[in-house]
């Protein structure tokens, strides 16, 4: 249990540190800032949760095979206290939970703790009944499966961000055709969209236009940037204006 408390403090500390680091301004060395620290923290916290779930599952199987008689009164009081403490921390973080992957990962850890103490509480409550010894391991396995599902989805999302994937809600073909529909004569190619960290999206593209002067191209680029911010929530856009075209074919450009 002491080890578990240490893990709780570690998980929360990592999430808070990454959040603080992620909000620091860019430096000459780290020109993107430090947002991606939050993705790395989420990945570590989710990976630890997967390992913890596996350990809990193994323990639950052992208790199924060899159920221990619960010490009901002491356990009931201790479990109730732990449950209240865990629910309080879950409630504290709950309103932030949708915010970003880092907070979601920390929230999942606290939610797992709260559910685990709920399992112990129920087991203590039902200790005198016939199913008493089975409640704790059965609920532990159920919780483990739910937590695993969320933890794997966080790991998947974090790995995609680290691989510079386009955000899940930004299908690039659709983005390019939305620009073409909105601005006639404008065509994007050699397009890259990625996410530095939670809520910090970057796009670069070549922009073919029908205009021939730089001031005209500049004002079109400004309008396209405004459109991409408003419609696609992309904050940092770099467009290379083309009149004659670079000869590249295809949305994603040519890679060597
Ligand atoms: Zn820039
Ligand atoms: Zn081009």
Image: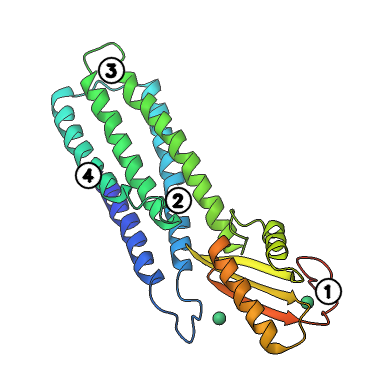
Going by the image, does 89 lie left or right of 197?
Answer: left
3D distance between C-alphas at marks 4 and 2: 21 Å
Q: Is residue 167 visible?
A: yes
Sequence-wise, the earlier of marks 4 and 1 is 4
Give the secondary structure at mark 1. loop
Is label 4 in contact with label 2 (beta carbons under 8 Å)?
Answer: no
Q: Residue at point 69% right, 82% down? A: 217
User: Which is in the foreground here, disc 3 or disc 2?
Assistant: 2
Observer-nearest of 7 and 204 = 204
User: Where the C terminus falls, by quadrant?
Assistant: bottom right
Label 2 CB sits under 8 Å from any ligand 1 atom:
no
Mark 1, Cα crowd under 10 Å, few <14 / some 14-19 / many 20+, is: few
Whole-percent x, y for residue 142 in the image: 42, 29
Give the secondary structure at mark 4. helix
Sequence-wise, the earlier of marks 1 and 3 is 3
Residue on which the image places disc 3: 132
Going by the image, does 24 lie left or right of 187?
Answer: left
Determine whether 10 is above or below 253 in the image: above
Label 1 CB sits under 8 Å from any ligand 2 atom:
yes
3D distance between C-alphas at marks 3 and 2: 31 Å
What is the number of the mark on residue 88? 4
């Amino acid at each position: 249990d002491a080890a578990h408390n240490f893990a709780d403090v570690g998980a929360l500390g990592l999430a808070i540190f990454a959040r603080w680091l992620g909000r620091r301004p860019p430096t000459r060395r780290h020109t993107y800032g430090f947002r991606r620290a939050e993705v790395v923290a989420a990945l570590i916290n989710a990976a630890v949760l997967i390992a913890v779930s596996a350990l809990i599952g193994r323990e639950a199987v052992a208790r199924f095979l060899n159920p221990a008689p619960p010490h009901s009164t002491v356990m009931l009081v201790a479990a109730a206290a732990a449950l209240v403490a865990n629910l309080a921390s879950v409630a504290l973080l709950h309103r932030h939970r949708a915010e970003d992957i880092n907070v979601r990962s920390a929230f999942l850890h606290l939610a797992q703790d709260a559910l685990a103490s709920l399992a112990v509480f129920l087991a203590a409550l039902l200790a005198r009944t016939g199913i008493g010894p089975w409640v704790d391991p059965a609920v532990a396995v159920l919780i483990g499966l739910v937590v695993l599902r969320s933890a794997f989805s966080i790991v998947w999302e974090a790995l995609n961000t680290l691989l510079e994937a386009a955000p899940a809600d930004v299908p690039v073909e659709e983005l390019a055709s939305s620009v073409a529909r909105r601005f006639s004569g404008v065509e994007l190619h050699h397009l890259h969209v990625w996410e530095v960290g939670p809520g910090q999206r970057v796009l670069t593209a070549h922009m073919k236009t029908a205009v021939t002067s730089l001031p005209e191209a500049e004002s079109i680029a400004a309008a396209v940037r405004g459109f991409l911010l408003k419609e696609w929530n992309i904050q940092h856009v770099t467009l290379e204006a083309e009149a004659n075209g670079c000869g590249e074919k295809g949305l994603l450009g040519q890679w060597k």
